Image (cartoon, grey):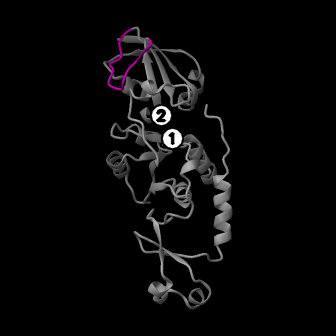
Amino acid sequence: MAGIKLRFYQSLNDFVRPVLRHAEMSHTLDRKASIKDMIEAFNVPHTEIALMLVNGSAVDFNYIVRDGDYIQVYPACPNLTATGLSQLRPALLPPLKFIVDVNLGKLARNLRLLGMDCGYQNDYADDDIARISSEEQRIVLTRDRSLLRRKIIVYGYYVRADAPMTQTKEVLNKFDLYPQIKPLTRCTHCNGLFRKIDKRMIEHRLEPLTRQYYQHFLMCSQCQRLYWQGSHHARLIGLIEELSTQHRNAIK
């Protein structure tokens, strides 16, 4: 039996019960437990955590909680030092790569539209997402807390918003992706990169009116889909401009 005191800071309070938010709490453990397991019992995914202090000293997720410990748990935020962050996971260098779970397909499409490397398939199982994230060092974007509890997932983020446009702006702000935006460089269907293609090479694939009125084409290097500035182009440009406008929302 171990009695501890525990406090979650800033955005981590999104996950705990309202009565426990922004306050020091007492907790009793009736069995030996790692700090990762103990924290996730409060529904806080380990991927959201940047720093854990036990009695004032930084620890990693393997630390075994002891009687009398005072535990402070922080998310990533500007006032945390690089030393503190390195306790838990290596820093990812840009350009960042993502993998999006099956319930966030419109978010994946929006990120690809902006040129982000964003893995997504609507038939991915959670096992697939976890494996790909680990193998390719991709950040998991999800609204499934249980997915983020998997130990194999090192980088992940729980998307708070419900609407796809708001979700996209949330992710752009969270990971400071505005410098990484390169619109219309990736296929929104498969994530492959575009390349210019000579019209003469793909004329046999074009409808008569498309062949007559359009001269410039892009082809996805992965799935071979063709893209051109059709009637939908102006709408896409408006969507890109709206998404690319930088609004720095405060991260709690």
Residue 187, disc: none
Q: How far across and down, in percent of the image, does residue 18 sit?
A: 60, 26
Q: What residue range appears in magenta?
A: 56-67
- Can you say which quadrant of the picture contains the C terminus? top right
Question: What amino acid is labelled 1 in the image?
Answer: Tyr
Disc 2: CA contacts within 10 A as few (<14), some (14-19) or many (>=20): some
Question: What amino acid is labelled 2 in the image?
Answer: Glu
Q: How far across and down, in percent of the image, does residue 115 sit?
A: 52, 58
- In the structure shown, which secondary structural element does the residue marked by tag 2 occupy? helix
Q: How far across and down, in percent of the image, does residue 58 sit?
A: 41, 19
Say whether residue 41 is visible.
no
* Residue matched to label 2: 48
Q: Main secondary structure of the magenta part?
A: loop
* Residue matched to label 1: 158
Disc 1: CA contacts within 10 A as few (<14), some (14-19) or many (>=20): some
- In the structure shown, which secondary structural element does the residue marked by tag 1 occupy? strand
Q: Are marks 2 and 1 in contact (CB under 8 Å)?
A: yes
Give above or below for 169 relative to 211: above
Q: Nearer the viewer, residue 227 or 13?
A: 227
Q: How far across and down, in percent of the image, does residue 144 sit?
A: 47, 43
Q: Residue at x 52, y 53 (%)?
A: 104
Magenta stretch contains residue 199: no
Give above or below for 188 relative to 91: below
